[in-house]
Amino acid sequence: MKVAYFDCHSGISGDMILGALLDAGVKIDTLRKELASLGLKGYELKSKRVKRGLFGGTKLDVVLSPKAHIHSRSFTDIEKLLKRSKLSKAVIEDATEIFLRIGKAEAKVHRTKIDKVHFHEVGAVDSIVDIVGGVIGMRELDVDRVSSSPLNTGEGTVQCEHGVLPVPAPATLELLKGIPCYSSGIPYELTTPTGAAMIGFWAETFESLPLMKIKKSGYGAGNHVINEHANLLRIVLGEAEGKGRASITLVEANIDDMNPEFYDLVMDSLFNAGALDVYLTSIMMKKNRPGVKVSVLAPSAMKKAISEILLKETTTFGVRFSEMDRVVLDRQHMEVNTPYGKVSVKVGSMDGKVVRVSPEYESCKKMAQKSKIPLKTVYDKAMYLAESKLKGGF
């Protein structure tokens, strides 16, 4: 599994992303060719090797011609621009989603609707090129999973179309919701709305460098030359142990004072929120009180949502977390035609080889009730037919 990790110790912006992608091997000619289909005029892509502190990186600039017409655009304008282009469907969808994120953030901070929002900085040619070019570059890398470090936002103030704003700017702050971030005290805008929207769209987790075999890295330079600080965005490319490996979070709480009837609804809420598994364990707590340990396995990005459910819907006063890795089989589904009706079957594979076949319980139950026969009869018949079908090629 190909993995990309963004090290955002100096924040993240659209031009830094493009610089890092070029430094990691994406060809600038590929970007130029793909971006040409947007039909934007009056700009040129230029890259150069620069130093930030004692370290080198690639600086990507969108150089505008003196006659270039810069104007604001609505989200609808940008959406039409993308749909009219000859870019791939995947690039159009990804870029549209990133612009939608920014549009929603702008609408919220300006207390208006998204169709009333007019992008200024983000509607300009250079920002459109940053976002669409970044999507093209990431598609060129063909990574399976993206993760990121927490984001260094910077601090102080920034001058923009709306005047002087605090760092992070209001729209940036809105885009950072749910993302771990901090300021190391550097008095510059290090994380921009464009950077926050792009990494928020791509990254599945925000964590330390994940387990991976490192293959290459790239460094994208920011605009500011900061004393004693390398203003660079680093992208690390590598391979994880397999497609079935992923990081998950275990969220737990010990409870000894809740009506046991409540657990059913709590479990429903947790599964609806995206929990992978929920289980209850009987434990003995202080003062010899019998209690229940609630354990929830969930994607790391769901940690906050899962915690809120446990804190709001149970009597616990706190929850705890454990980060862990898991390995799962690649899963596919197939249907088999039994004498009792169609039954869904789950197929688990490892390295392309089938290692597990399991008829779905609910599907078997439905057929058993319909035909008024034992569940085991339906299950065994579905298993036999599935294994026979697999021998002939799935």
Image (tube, rainbow, N blue to C red):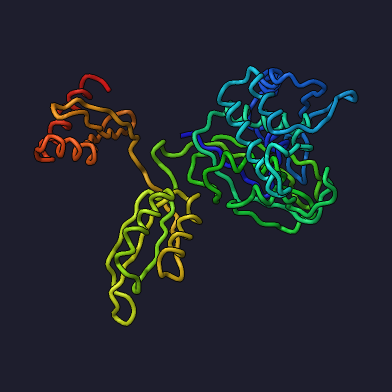
Q: Is residue 346 left or right of residue 307?
A: left
Q: Is residue 295 left or right of residue 392?
A: right
Residue displayed at 31% across by 71% down: 291
Kindly identify the residue that appears in the image at 42 percent across and 59 percent down.
251
Decide if residue 10 is in sight here: no
* Residue closer to the observer: 157 or 69: 69
Q: Quadrant of the N terminus?
A: top left
Q: Position of residue 121 (x, y in %)?
A: 78, 38
Which of the 4 image quadrants contains residue 323? bottom left
Residue at the bottom extreme, as displayed: 287
Q: Residue furthest right?
A: 66
In the rendered image of this protein, does residue 248 appear above or below residue 315? above
Relative side of 176 to 249, left or right = right
Residue 300 percent across, percent down from the top left? 47, 50
Report the label total: 0
Residue 272 visible within the image: yes
Residue at 22%, 36% in the rendered image: 359
Determine the image quadrant of residue 114: top right
Place of residue 364 in the rendered image (x, y in percent of width and height, measured from the top left)? 19, 37
Q: Quadrant of residue 309?
A: bottom left
- Eyeballing the image, is 363 above or below 257? above
Quadrant where the C terminus is found in the figure: top left
Q: Nearer the viewer, residue 362 or 347?
A: 362
Coordinates of residue 145 in the picture (x, y in percent) = 50, 37
